[in-house]
Image (cartoon, grey):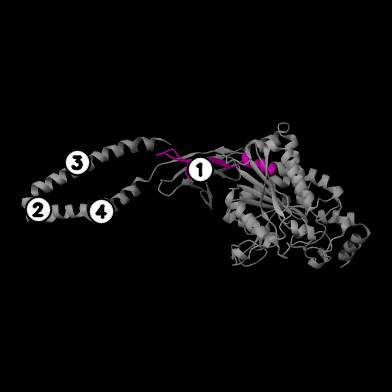
Amino acid sequence: MKFLFSFLLLSVVSPALFHSALARGGLNRSISPDFVSLAYGGSARFLLEDNNSKRSDKIMQGYMTNKELERAVKAFGKKCSKISKIYSIGDSVQGFPLWVIEISDKPGQEEAEPAFKYIGNVHGDEPVGRELLLQFANWICDNYLKDPLATLIVENVHLHILPSMNPDGFSLRTRNNANNVDLNRDFPDQFFFINDDEYARQPETKAIMKWMRDIHFTASATLHGGALVANYPWDGTADKRKDYYACPDDQTFRFMASVYSRSHHNMSLSQEFEGGITNGASWYPIYGGMQDWNYIHGGCFELTLEITDNKWPPANELATIFEYNKLSMLNLVASLAQTGIHGRIFSSESGRPLPGTITLKGIDYLVKASETLGVYHRLAAPKQKYEVSASMPGYKSKNTSIWLEEGAMSVDFILDPDTTTKRKVMQNCDCYGGHGVNFVGYIWGHYYEAYIFLAVVLVFICFLFQKKMKSRLPKQRLVALPKRIVV
């Protein structure tokens, strides 16, 4: 009680020292949420907005309005037109466009490169992300061909930036959208039957889901406020208990989260979260979140990044917060090209790309290759041995063992058609209409003596038929043999 009173007194006498204590993990999580919500959520992301439904105009000063954000996005498109493309993935409840900045040396084109997306302002009262993402985009534009990381990202990754997923919540200065729905609880859930009605979902949610269907994202991250930690799946548990619940790619997610945390100014020094990272369910479970949905349904490895203890810090602190996060944001995107297993899947018969699937032995998760290019990007924790398998219906699966070092590895697969399946199809095929071939066989096997007067005709027909079939077999074998040599 004395400890609680001291913190409350500190929050009144010196807010700056209070926030600093929160950042160092000084506020124990056993304290009731009602008390913690008076601060800035240093200990739990379930913290809702302050009791004041409307934030003061003073705290809004220095932050871009939605119109100013729109102008900034379009201005960026003109400034960096050679390496960017501006587009919208839909509209908010109140009709504001959800603007996206794509950064690449070939924007708008499909390439054999991984795609990454950053999303900010998921919650309306967490506006730091939208400000940082605009600064981040401009920094890459200004430093392309000057800074190695900026150049690597532009030339080897398709980066998509959605500064504000919830512009209505921002303008209303509330956590939820204009329909008072928490967008990070509006996605289908793996444990409970919630949000399964597509028509009941919010327009912002549906826009994200359609975006995921249109673009094959390899990885993603959302920027939040209220704590300082990199969060990874699973976000929930089947029994709703607060407990560590690992997804199949737990090691890979821990690696990704550590890439961000270790590159940050002080995230990895957290006294509350070891290494500055946490499993979502171990922190506290949520359901209907975007992070788990991305991994399950989108084939996309997503992190939830809590980048500042203060949800709405003074605008004059934004430049410092950006500097604290800049290297982390760069390294996380660059890691898609610098680590993992990448390659393409081809058919040995035609040479065309195949939209097959990639699996790693012992990890219950499929990564799909792209439909048109047959390219895949399989993120994996480094310094481990993996058995990589490629499969495709109608083709024989292939696998290979690799040792993945710190850097990325390229592994292409050339799959042979499954001729066994084709033979079964041919045997069951009614190739000559009706049962003509079976009828001839039946006559030949059982009624030869009864129909001796037709022997000459039947023998001649069967001779031609057998000769035709035999002439086909050598050709098939001649074609098949070289294909098996191609590996």
Q: Which residue is mark 1?
A: 374
**Which one is nearer the viewer's eye here, 112 or 430?**
430
Q: Marks 3 and 4, Cα distance to the nearest angstrom? A: 20 Å
Residue 319 point in image, percent of width and height: 83, 44
Mark 2 or mark 4, earlier in chain: 4
* The magenta segment: 331-354
Mark 3 or mark 4, earlier in chain: 4
Q: Marks 3 and 2, Cα distance to the nearest angstrom? A: 20 Å
Which numbered disc covers residue 448?
2
Name the mark nearer the viewer: 4 or 1. 4
Q: Which residue is mark 4?
A: 433
Image quadrant occupied by the C terminus: top left
- Say which element carries label 3: helix
Which amino acid is tagged 3?
Lys
- Say which element carries label 2: loop
Mark 1 or mark 2, earlier in chain: 1
Say above or below: 211 vs 483. Answer: below
Q: Marks 1 and 3, Cα distance to the nearest angstrom? A: 40 Å
Residue 256 point in image, percent of width and height: 66, 47
Left or right, 150 with reference to 18: left
Q: Residues within 10 Å of mark 2 (few under 14, many from 20)?
A: some
Q: Marks 1 and 2, Cα distance to the nearest angstrom? A: 55 Å
